Image (cartoon, helix red, strand yellow):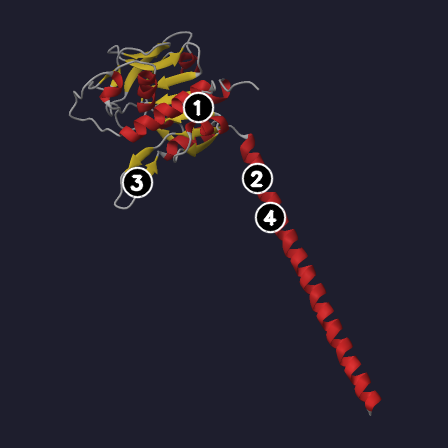
Amino acid sequence: MICFAFFRFNFLEFYQSNYIFLLFKMSTYFRKLCSYKIYKSFSLRNLREVHFMQDSVILISTAIEPGARSSKRTASTLYGDALARAGLSGVLYAGGDPIALAGRCDGLLLSGGGDLEPALYGQTPQSHRLSLDPVRDTEELALLRAFCALRKPVLGICRGMQVINVAFGGTLLQEVAGHDGIPHPVTTVAGTHTARLTGGFFKVSSYHHQAVGQLGHGLCAAAYAADGLIEALEHRSLPILGVQWHPERMIPGLCTDVPADHSALFTYFIQRKPKP
């Protein structure tokens, strides 16, 4: 009886210990399986990220829209679409250190929007239609300086071209007629990057009530409107180009305010990318 009890006890102990061992092995296998799946998922994600980072990444400046609880950063989706057509990846600026961002991105697109503070170019407000955003002014000027320091390409569109001119000490005309929502012809200056990318004469999608006045240091005019206003500018030594019109609204299959194709302007980032 005693022997049977001893045997029965040992049998139960053996069964329990092996049962626990079996559970341990199963849990270990399950953990390994899960870890493998997580690893594979992580690896695939990393591969996608590496592939993404192989593309040229262009930082797009943003407008700031006040809200009841918080402000919003916005930019037209056409900028990203136009960059994608050129084989580029666009990312929206949402704050951060301009120097660090310039180091990580391959170029800067200064987008369209409101007006610059007249004090930045030595004037007082003279237009009743001014739409000002001092925070955006400060951010974009800092971003432009950071990208210029690394000699990385910058494309300014509408307001963005005006930011470039002001940054280099130029001035703006605070109110001009015949350019806000009215397509008009533009003639480029021969030998400029603008002429090479767009051609010599064309109509543009125009939405501005201000314009470049006196050109900033190191800048030259690259296109003119029929009334003599500067419609494009370039820097003489830095990879900087600005256009007063909206090339993102002049791309067949994407947006065509006027019958012209200015998708080539966005390849400027590729052509002027610093060589390693």
Amino acid type, label 3: Ser
Asked whether disc 1 touches disc 4, contact meaning CB atoms under 8 Å apart, the reply is no
Horizontal relation, residue 245 to residue 106: left or right: left
Q: Earlier in the sequence, mark 4 or mark 2?
A: 4
Under circle 3, the secondary element is: loop
Q: Mark 2 sits on what residue?
A: 48
Frontmost of labels 1 and 4 is 4
Horizontal relation, residue 43 to residue 75: left or right: right
* Residue that protrudes farthest toward the right in the picture: 3
Q: Residues within 10 Å of mark 4 (few under 14, many from 20)?
A: few
Q: Mark 4 sits on what residue?
A: 41
Amino acid type, label 1: Phe
Horizontal relation, residue 194 to residue 118: left or right: right
Distance between the Cα atoms at labels 3 and 4? Answer: 35 Å
Q: Residues within 10 Å of mark 2 (few under 14, many from 20)?
A: few
Place residue 246 in its image quadrant: top left
Distance between the Cα atoms at labels 1 and 2? Answer: 24 Å
Q: Earlier in the sequence, mark 1 or mark 2?
A: 2
Q: Earlier in the sequence, mark 3 or mark 4?
A: 4
Frontmost of labels 3 and 1 is 3
Amino acid type, label 4: Ser
Residue depicted at 60% across the width and 44% down the height: 44
Closer to us: 140 or 84: 140
